[in-house]
């Protein structure tokens, strides 16, 4: 039975930012006891209290102090430890508590009032307490993301340390641990049910485009701490350096590891550089990264790098592009490729009416027609590959929730990754069904692509005039008009098909070089092929001959009798010229007899 939840929980603003269901794993107000918490205290003799941690039932808080009537009672190490929490299977786990101190700031107490977490109850990690009271006895609410420690079971503690020279006072209350339920148990975006492809994207656009536009000062300031890990360091997807929030810099004359700044994952130059657009401060695509790595990425396209001219300690690379001939590309590490792909799916949805081909290399990735942006085929194939190879992580879920809390919208492709397939992938054209099993890419393909020879075999298996049920991306070379081979063309998606008269093996737009190609494979174009300058090179309906990159001439692959009356003869323009055999001029002709395809060069 389909489940759908829309939960608005304003007091839990980190993890419940959009469509989800949450569960309370722990709720301890310390109203009249320490509840399920246990004590582990090491203290000097002469302390005033039988227990350093105790509950003030009159006001409802757990209090710890080694200072009585202005006199320190000695050094102590007092731990208030939570019960063991079963956190397996949850998308996100967040600790929330209210606290205050006598000093009223973190300067005095940051080394004495600690929060720690452990997966095994033995090895403990100190976490950063994000919020401290601004005045004495002024309670403030803290929220700490524990997802990184929540793979199975976990515990946390409030640890109080005093010395013979300093003994502050700490009060804690309203301790809650809340978890976000796995997406298997709920169906977000129920308004999408039954919609297909572009209609899905249009509805999502309606859902997420009207969000709060932040100022750039907010993005750089305290309200943009969306990349801070549980240990207080910056989560940098470009490098392995450990920055603090205070390590921000402008990125001028910097070296690696010196500081970090903000990266627009989709470069602002691609939309013309306007700072008045909401995407200029959209935190879903603004990341904190090493300033040098940011400078190296610049506004280059993302791609897999063939030869690197630069790399760093995490493995990010800059170098020659694999999929765009003659281009420079930036390649992130595998761990974050899916993150970047889902950011691009988000940007092409939240801002689907914006033109991303206005500057830089945006024209390599996107098209803009009839006031709608979309992927070019090569870019889409790459983004689908990265999305599938690097699934949504806990880190993405946490970040998405933080951003949604700040600006009021989610990245739906993080919450429901299957939407990618329904709009651009294997489920394209099928009505959206939250409960349906998503079709995996064709097992016979590599990253969703097939060779021209494989496309030919699939087409030959069809009855005349029929079309395959699946869409493919073909890889190989295609000849140009003068009979030579071209290395300019990139992968394009197509439907394997046969023409009603049986005259063509399969329809395709063009072929790409990244796979073996059988000499003589035949392609009939369903549309115009353009070179990189936009000049038409091949016209509608032309038949062209595929050759490998090393070929210098077209060669026969089948022995067909030129004079056999059952053999059909086609020119390279796709015209059947069988009746003109005796008078055919010099050139290359395609022969077809049943399922056999060959070529003849008339000299």
Image: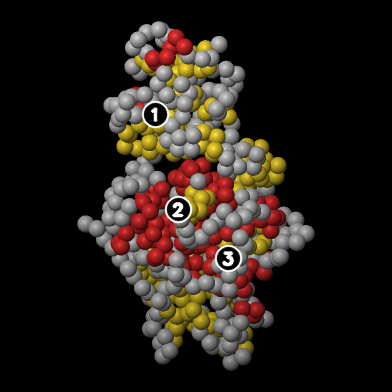
Q: Give the Cα distance between marks 1 and 2.
A: 37 Å
Please, which residue is most extreme toward the right here? 253
Question: Element type at marker 2?
Answer: loop
Please, which residue is most extreme toward the left here? 1
> Is residue 302 rendered to the left or right of residue 421?
right
Mark nearest the camera among 3 and 1 is 1
Label whose residue precedes the other's in the sequence (2 or 3): 3
* Residue found 48% across the figure and 43% down from its top: 377
Question: Element type at marker 3?
Answer: helix
Label whose residue precedes the other's in the sequence (3 or 1): 3
- Relative to 129, residue 543 above or below: above
Residue nearer the viewer, 352 or 284: 352
Residue 181 coordinates in the image, percent (x, y): 35, 61
Q: Where the C terminus falls, by quadrant?
A: top right
Q: Mark 1, residues whose alpha carbon is within 10 Å: few (<14), some, or many (≥20)?
A: many
- Relative to 354, residue 82 above or below: below
Q: Where the N terminus falls, by quadrant?
A: bottom left
Mark nearest the camera among 2 and 3 is 3
Q: Which residue is mark 1?
A: 506
Q: Which residue is mark 2?
A: 392
Whether label 1 touches label 2, CB < 8 Å: no
> Is residue 244 rendered to the left or right of residue 415?
right
């Amino acid at each position: 039975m389909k489940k759908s939840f829309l939960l608005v929980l304003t007091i839990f603003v980190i993890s419940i930012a959009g469509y989800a269901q949450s569960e309370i794993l722990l709720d301890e107000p310390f109203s009249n006891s320490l509840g399920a918490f246990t004590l582990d205290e090491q203290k000097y003799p002469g302390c005033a209290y039988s227990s350093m941690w105790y509950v003030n039932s009159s006001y409802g808080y757990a209090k710890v102090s080694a200072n009585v009537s202005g006199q320190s009672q000695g050094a102590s190490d007092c731990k208030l430890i939570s019960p063991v929490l079963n956190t397996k299977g949850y998308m996100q786990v967040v600790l929330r508590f209210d606290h205050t101190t006598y000093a009223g700031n973190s300067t005095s107490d940051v080394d004495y009032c600690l929060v720690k977490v452990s997966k095994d109850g033995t090895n403990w990690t100190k976490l950063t307490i994000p919020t401290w009271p601004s005045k004495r006895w002024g309670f403030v609410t803290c929220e700490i993301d524990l997802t990184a420690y929540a793979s199975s079971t976990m515990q946390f503690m409030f640890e109080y340390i005093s010395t013979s020279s300093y003994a502050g006072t700490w009060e804690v209350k309203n301790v809650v641990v809340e978890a976000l339920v796995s997406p298997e148990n709920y169906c977000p975006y129920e308004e999408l049910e039954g919609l297909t492809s572009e209609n899905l994207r249009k509805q999502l656009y309606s859902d997420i485009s009207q969000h709060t536009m932040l100022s750039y000062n907010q993005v750089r300031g305290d309200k943009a701490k969306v990349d801070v890990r549980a240990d207080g360091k910056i989560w940098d997807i470009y490098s392995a350096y450990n920055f603090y929030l205070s390590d921000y810099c402008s990125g001028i004359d910097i070296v690696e590891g010196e500081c970090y700044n903000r990266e627009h994952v989709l470069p602002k130059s691609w939309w013309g550089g306007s700072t008045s657009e909401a995407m200029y401060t959209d935190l879903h695509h603004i990341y904190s990264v090493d300033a040098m790595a940011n400078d190296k990425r610049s506004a280059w396209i993302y791609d897999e790098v063939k030869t690197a001219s630069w790399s760093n300690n995490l493995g990010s690379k800059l170098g020659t592009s694999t999929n765009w001939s003659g281009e420079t590309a930036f390649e992130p590490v595998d761990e974050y490729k899916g993150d970047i792909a889902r950011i691009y799916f988000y940007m092409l949805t939240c801002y689907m009416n914006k033109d991303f081909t206005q500057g830089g290399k945006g024209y390599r990735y996107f098209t803009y027609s009839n006031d709608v942006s979309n992927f070019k085929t090569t870019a889409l194939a790459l983004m689908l590959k990265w999305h599938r190879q690097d699934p949504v992580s806990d880190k993405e879920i946490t970040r998405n929730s933080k951003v949604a809390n700040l600006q009021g919208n989610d990245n739906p492709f993080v919450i429901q990754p299957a939407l990618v397939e329904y709009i651009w992938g294997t489920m394209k054209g099928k009505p959206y069904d939250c409960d349906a099993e998503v079709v995996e890419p064709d097992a016979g393909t590599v990253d969703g692509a097939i060779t021209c020879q494989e496309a030919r075999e699939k087409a030959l298996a069809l009855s005349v005039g029929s079309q395959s049920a699946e869409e493919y991306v073909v890889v190989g070379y295609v000849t140009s008009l003068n009979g030579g081979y071209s290395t300019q063309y990139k992968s394009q998606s197509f439907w394997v098909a046969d023409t009603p008269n049986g005259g063509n093996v399969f329809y395709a737009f063009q072929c790409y070089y990244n796979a073996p190609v059988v000499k003589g494979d035949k392609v009939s174009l369903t549309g115009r092929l353009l070179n990189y300058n936009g000049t038409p090179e091949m016209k509608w309906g032309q038949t062209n001959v595929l050759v490998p990159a090393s070929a210098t001439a077209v060669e026969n692959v089948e022995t067909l009798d030129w004079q056999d009356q059952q053999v059909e003869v086609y020119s390279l323009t796709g015209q059947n010229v069988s009746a003109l055999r005796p008078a055919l001029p010099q050139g290359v002709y395609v022969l077809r007899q049943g399922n056999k395809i060959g070529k003849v060069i008339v000299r």
